[in-house]
């Protein structure tokens, strides 16, 4: 297992964490726009917020957990949460999401608390957003916009930033509005049927220009991401050609994926108790207890109702999961609803071609903070599961042994005399395979090992079968 110093760790993830905490939003220093219809043309500014959700199914506890997660998302985006409301309905109101009566109550709560933003726990249609804004008189955003805002704050790599921008533009395009309804109602003469000279008002002209610019920018971003994914594919193919097994760490956001990667490899990536703390995938090398080399990749975290725009934009990144030989599905054992986390992640797996077929180990993390009864319950339900604590190191040795057992087997056993001038092949057998015995004799090294097919072929070209050695 990799050994690393405190300095190594500080120079990577801790520096990222220090940089992120160095600049925080300060409430009350912004200028409000008077016309809420222009709200999409400015960046999201989340300061003092009221949360509102619609409870359509499940238990009251499920509804509370969903709103609690929305609170954590809002705080991750830099907001101060003032109040949370849940409306019990069979389905969301098509006009205002929560119904006109509840919307008026919400307006009273907004005025009483001094909130400047309302966040809805769902993806709202453009019309729902507009009508709710007109009633509550402050900015209204939905869960999707909130998650996109967090991704925009946390993306660091060129690919990550491009993926997030593409997702944001995809979300924004159908939600653009003009400069107010009165400007778009100017019409021409009756001969033109109301659509002749001057038939389009300035509002509509502006919105058409904006839509065209957004579509052009989206096309450019898709080309850029396509080029970056080609580079990612090249690196992935290189690893596959070397026939090094690949493990992918996937799971719900804040389940402890980066902590687990650090514990297994000493990667030192950013660890923060926040949702979507790390977005850019990290690939590191590691070894099983028997010394077998494999790669392990940390992937972007999932969440309930992960916006489909993000699934599409991050498809090239999520393919790390589909191309892996083994998935470590990390779940937070101390979370109020760990089974819900597992289901939400598997829902995203279903959208990634090939991901559902990859063998999976459920890693129940945060054992040091979880209830033993909950840990036992998950372990009973999930056949291939193991309980660990990435923070304390509990269960990590057992996890590494389980990875060794689940990785594709080295199915080529060789017993050859390898000349001393090809010691590089013996070294590769130690690194990439499983050496059973080594004996140094006069003419070379007698090697007995299990190796991958490509290395077996190279060894057979230069080595002599043991039975022919005199």
Image (cartoon, rainbow, N blue to C red):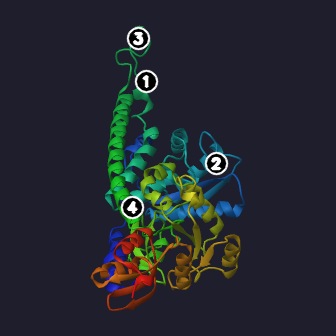
**For residue 285, side relative to residue 147 (left or right):** left
Instruction: Name the residue carrying label 3.
Output: 192
Instruction: Name the residue carrying label 1.
Output: 185
Q: Earlier in the sequence, mark 1 or mark 3?
A: 1
- Quarter of the picture holding the N terminus: bottom left
**For residue 399, side relative to residue 279 (left or right):** right
From the viewer's side, name the closer residue of 233 and 271: 233
From the viewer's side, name the closer residue of 414 and 147: 414
Pair 3/4: label in front:
4
Q: Which structural element holds mark 3? A: helix
**For residue 400, side relative to residue 183 (left or right):** right
Q: Please provide percent x and percent y for residue 175.
A: 46, 40
Q: Earlier in the sequence, mark 2 or mark 4?
A: 2
Marks 1 and 2: CB-CB under 8 Å?
no
Instruction: Give the Cα distance between marks 1 and 4.
Output: 55 Å
For residue 187, which quarter of the picture?
A: top left
Residue located at (60% from left, 39% from top): 95
Q: Please provide percent x and percent y for residue 173.
A: 43, 40
Q: Earlier in the sequence, mark 3 or mark 2?
A: 2
Instruction: Give the Cα distance between marks 2 and 4.
Output: 52 Å
Q: Which structural element holds mark 4? A: helix
Count of labels in the image: 4
Task: Single out the residue that lies furthest toward the top.
Answer: 191
Instruction: Name the residue carrying label 4.
Output: 236
Instruction: Give the Cα distance between marks 1 and 2.
Output: 32 Å
Let me know if residue 85 appears in the view.
yes
Instruction: Give the Cα distance between marks 3 and 2.
Output: 44 Å
Marks 2 and 4: CB-CB under 8 Å?
no
Q: Please provide percent x and percent y for residue 302.
A: 52, 61
Instruction: Name the residue carrying label 2.
Output: 102
Pair 1/4: label in front:
4
From the viewer's side, name the closer residue of 182 and 209: 209
């Amino acid at each position: 297992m990799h050994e690393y110093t405190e300095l190594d760790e500080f120079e990577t993830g801790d520096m990222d964490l220090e940089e992120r905490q160095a600049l925080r939003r300060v409430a009350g220093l912004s200028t409000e726009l008077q016309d809420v219809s222009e709200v999409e043309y400015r960046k999201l500014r989340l300061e003092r917020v009221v949360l509102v959700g619609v409870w359509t199914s499940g238990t009251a506890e499920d509804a509370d957990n969903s709103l609690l997660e929305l609170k954590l998302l809002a705080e991750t985006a830099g907001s101060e949460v003032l109040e949370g409301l849940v409306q019990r309905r069979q389905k969301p109101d098509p006009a205002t999401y929560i119904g006109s009566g509840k919307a008026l109550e919400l307006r009273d709560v907004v005025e009483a608390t001094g909130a400047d933003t309302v966040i809805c726990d769902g993806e709202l249609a453009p019309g729902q957003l507009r009508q709710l804004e007109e009633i509550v008189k402050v900015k209204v955003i939905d869960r999707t916009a909130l998650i996109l805002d967090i991704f925009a704050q946390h993306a660091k790599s060129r690919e990550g930033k491009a993926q997030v921008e593409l997702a944001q533009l995809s979300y924004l395009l159908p939600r653009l509005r003009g400069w107010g309804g009165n400007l778009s109602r100017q019409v021409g003469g009756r001969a033109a049927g109301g659509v002749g000279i001057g038939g389009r008002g300035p509002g509509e002209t502006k919105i058409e220009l904006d839509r065209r610019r957004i579509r052009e920018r989206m096309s450019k971003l898709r080309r850029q991401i396509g080029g970056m994914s080609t580079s990612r594919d090249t690196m992935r193919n290189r690893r596959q050609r070397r026939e090094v097994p690949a493990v992918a760490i996937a799971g719900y956001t804040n389940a402890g994926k980066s902590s687990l990667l650090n514990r297994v490899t000493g990667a030192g990536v950013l660890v923060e108790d926040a949702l979507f703390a790390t977005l850019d995938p990290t690939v590191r090398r590691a070894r099983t207890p028997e010394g077998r080399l494999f790669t392990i990749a940390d992937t972007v975290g999932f969440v309930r109702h992960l916006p489909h725009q993000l699934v599409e934009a991050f498809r090239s990144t999520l393919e790390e999961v589909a191309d892996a030989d083994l998935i470590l599905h990390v779940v937070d054992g101390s979370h109020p609803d760990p089974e819900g986390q597992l289901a939400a992640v598997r829902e995203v797996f279903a959208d990634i071609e090939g991901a559902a077929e990859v063998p999976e180990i459920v890693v129940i993390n945060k054992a040091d903070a979880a209830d033993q009864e909950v840990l036992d319950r998950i372990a009973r339900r999930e056949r291939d599961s193991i309980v660990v604590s990435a923070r304390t190191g509990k269960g990590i040795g057992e996890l590494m042994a389980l990875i060794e057992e689940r990785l594709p087997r080295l199915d080529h056993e060789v017993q050859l005399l390898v000349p001393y001038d090809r010691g590089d092949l013996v070294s590769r057998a130690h690194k990439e395979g499983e050496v059973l015995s080594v004996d140094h004799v006069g003419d070379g090294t007698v090697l007995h090992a299990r190796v991958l097919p490509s290395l077996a072929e190279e060894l057979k070209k230069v080595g002599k079968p043991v039975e022919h050695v005199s």
